[in-house]
Image (spheres, grey):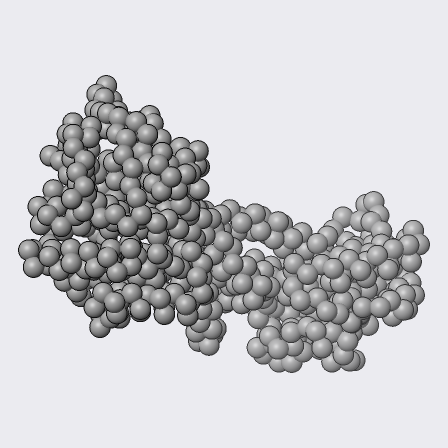
């Protein structure tokens, strides 16, 4: 060990090069995973907090409904079933209706989303996104709309607009709504098309006092988009509990674009990681091989003195292991520290055009990063192993040196 | 083979083959070396001195013939067994590049003991003792590049004898040393031979060393031309 450290110190340039070959892939992967974790988390949280929840109980699909969701009249029974199941953290009844919003000569097709304000408040951040006016309260008869819709209809807080609901099951309903709040939507599409009202207001529009389109629920203990075990557990508990009219959908069915991104991202990240590990391994192999070549006479001497092949292999592998472990630790540390620095400054702000695009796909308009320690450890350990495996070839070649030939070797 | 022969070569032949060219280095050498001898093999360049030394040390394999080390036929040994034999039975002193540059004098001396698996405390103690006997204890913590060529060769001798091998093989040990250093090294090896009955076998054409050996084998064209005990 002592000799290995001295060898590494003696060939500083080569040691630094080998160290960088391990350090850079680990640092890059930690940084890349940090970014993608934040993206996935952002998309997942946006989708599941504001829109889909982790799961929904809905009426099974019906023919001829167009873009409307079928109505359920037995939402209270579904709520009662959810309340009996272990793992449900939160649930609320919602009524989504397709409608046409109009103000003077302007109109826009929208979804009127009826919610129970005090029930959605703990998990929805719409209230925090209100930039003008206020969010819904129990008994509010007005609407909260996105900045995009307010601009399209040319309305502001306290202005009125008309919504014309046209659900295939209940027919046409009309309401005049006052804008009580305008919010900055995390999704541009959402800001343009969703009108938030109380459940009572939506039921008035549907002309059906018991109507709902979904019971939205969140499952406790879910840490992110990749953590499906808790949701799967609740889903299995709910199997067969709602008869033939109702069905349970989880977020993967309700937000297919997010699960689609995840499905693409995971293999893409794996391929990138493999490429980086491969490049790192090649540099490690090359530098250690050159090191063995340079030390041919010394290794020949060691073999002449009676060192076994395993001893020679071990000499090279100990050096490789020292570099690999140090490179992996430094790489992980640099990656983690950089992520902390980025987050301490509130992320990397994106230009307006990129920010708008990020909002469209459900992300915050800044580059954020999130550390997941198992990924950091896995990246470091995997690169360490790859580097040590790469060192096997030069180590093996060293062990095969013929002592007489090796000692004649001229650099 | 005589009963007390430490090493016996039996019609030893070695031919180097390079592409289409065959170069015979040894053409049938049969010699016996005995414990406590202080022997040199001499001869002109290309006579096969170094080849004989390499074969005796198990660093290379003969084309034909065999070597018996304490009765054990070296041709029967695998590469790993030969390595073990070198480790336990043979001490080497080479002409140059004798020491491991990243190890101190003490660590270089103790290196063979480390390979043998001797406990750290014991190998340090034994190495220190040998260094003291050879008068280089003061350099124990120095790296090879901090001491002179003569001192480096002394360290090489210390490493060669520290594990008390059956024989020390030395290939041109004085070739890179000036006269004073050469005489000093020869005196040292002679003292080890007489005091500790250490067996030395040199390949050399250094007359200063040849004058001091007890037995001189002369090789010419890969054959023993003369074998004189003085």
Nearest to the observer: residue A291 or residue A306: A306
Numbered label tally: 0
Please report the residue visible at 34 percent of the width from the left and 27 percent of the height from the top: B65
Above/below status of A310 relative to B157: above
Is residue A350 visible to the viewer in this orientation of the structure?
A: no
A85 horizontally vs A220: left or right: right
Which quadrant of the view contains residue A217? bottom right
Q: Residue at x 83, y 45 (%)?
A: A63
Quick check: A190 above or below B203? Answer: below
Which quarter of the picture shows residue A117? bottom right
Query: Does residue A293 appear left or right of residue A140 in this picture?
Result: left
Residue A175: % across, % down: 76, 68
Q: Is residue A116 above or below residue A14?
A: below
Q: From the viewer's perspective, is residue B101 above or below residue B89?
A: below
Q: On the rendered image, what quadrant is the N terminus of chain B found in?
A: top left
Q: Position of residue A104 (x, y in %)?
A: 63, 65
């Amino acid at each position: 060990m002592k000799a290995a450290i001295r060898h590494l110190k003696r060939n500083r340039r080569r040691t630094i090069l080998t160290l960088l070959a391990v350090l850079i892939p680990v640092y890059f992967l930690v940084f890349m995973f940090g970014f993608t974790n934040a993206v996935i988390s952002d998309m997942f949280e946006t989708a599941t907090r504001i829109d889909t929840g982790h799961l929904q109980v809905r009426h099974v699909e019906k023919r001829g409904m167009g873009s409307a969701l079928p109505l359920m009249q037995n939402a209270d029974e579904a709520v009662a079933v959810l309340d009996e199941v272990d793992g449900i953290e939160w649930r609320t009844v919602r009524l989504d209706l397709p409608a046409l919003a109009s103000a003077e000569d302007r109109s826009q097709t929208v979804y009127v989303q009826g919610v129970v304000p005090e029930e959605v408040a703990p998990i929805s951040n719409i209230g925090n996104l209100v930039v003008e006016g206020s969010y819904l309260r129990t008994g509010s008869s007005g609407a909260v709309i996105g900045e995009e819709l307010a601009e399209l209809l040319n309305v502001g807080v306290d202005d009125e607009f008309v919504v014309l609901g046209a659900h295939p099951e209940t027919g046409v309903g009309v309401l005049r709504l006052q804008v009580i709040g305008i919010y900055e939507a995390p999704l541009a599409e959402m800001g343009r098309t969703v009108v938030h009202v109380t459940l009572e207001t939506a039921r008035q529009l549907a002309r059906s006092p018991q109507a709902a389109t979904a019971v939205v629920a969140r499952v406790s203990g879910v840490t992110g988009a990749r953590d499906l075990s808790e949701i799967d557990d609740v889903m299995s508990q709910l199997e067969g509990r709602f008869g033939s009219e109702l069905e349970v959908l989880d977020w993967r069915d309700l937000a297919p674009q997010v699960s689609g991104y995840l499905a693409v991202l995971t293999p893409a990240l794996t391929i990138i990681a493999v490429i980086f590990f491969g490049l790192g391994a090649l540099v490690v192999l090359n530098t250690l091989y050159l090191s063995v070549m340079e030390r041919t006479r010394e290794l020949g001497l060691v073999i002449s003195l009676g060192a076994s092949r395993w001893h020679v292999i071990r000499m090279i592998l100990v050096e490789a292991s020292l570099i690999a472990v140090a490179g992996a630790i430094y790489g992980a540390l640099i990656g983690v520290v950089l992520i902390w620095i980025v987050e301490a400054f509130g992320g990397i702000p994106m230009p307006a055009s990129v920010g708008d695009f990020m909002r469209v796909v459900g992300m915050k308009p800044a580059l954020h990063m999130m550390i997941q320690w198992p990924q950091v450890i896995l990246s470091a350990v995997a690169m360490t192993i790859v580097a040590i495996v790469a060192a096997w070839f030069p180590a093996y070649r060293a062990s095969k040196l013929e002592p007489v030939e090796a000692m004649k070797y001229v650099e | 083979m005589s009963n007390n022969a430490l090493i016996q070569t039996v019609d030893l032949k070695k031919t180097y083959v390079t592409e289409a060219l065959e170069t015979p280095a040894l053409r049938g050498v049969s010699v016996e070396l005995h414990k406590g001898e202080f022997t040199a093999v001499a001869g002109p360049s290309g006579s096969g001195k170094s080849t004989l030394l390499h074969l005796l040390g198990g660093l290379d394999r003969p084309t034909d013939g065999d070597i018996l080390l304490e009765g054990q036929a070296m041709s029967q040994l695998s590469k790993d067994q030969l390595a073990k034999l070198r480790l336990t039975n043979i001490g080497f002193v080479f002409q140059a590049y004798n020491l491991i540059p990243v190890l101190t004098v003490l660590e270089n001396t103790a290196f063979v003991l480390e390979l043998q698996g001797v406990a750290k405390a014991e190998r340090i103690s034994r190495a220190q003792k040998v260094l003291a006997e050879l008068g280089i204890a003061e350099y124990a913590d120095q790296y090879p590049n901090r001491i002179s060529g003569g001192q480096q060769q002394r360290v090489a001798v210390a490493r060669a004898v520290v594990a008390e091998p059956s024989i020390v093989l030395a290939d041109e040990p004085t070739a890179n040393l000036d006269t004073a250093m050469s005489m000093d090294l020869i005196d040292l090896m002679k003292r080890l031979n007489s005091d500790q009955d250490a067996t030395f076998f040199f390949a050399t054409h250094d007359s200063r060393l040849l004058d001091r050996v007890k037995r001189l084998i002369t090789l010419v064209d890969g054959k023993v031309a003369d074998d004189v005990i003085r």
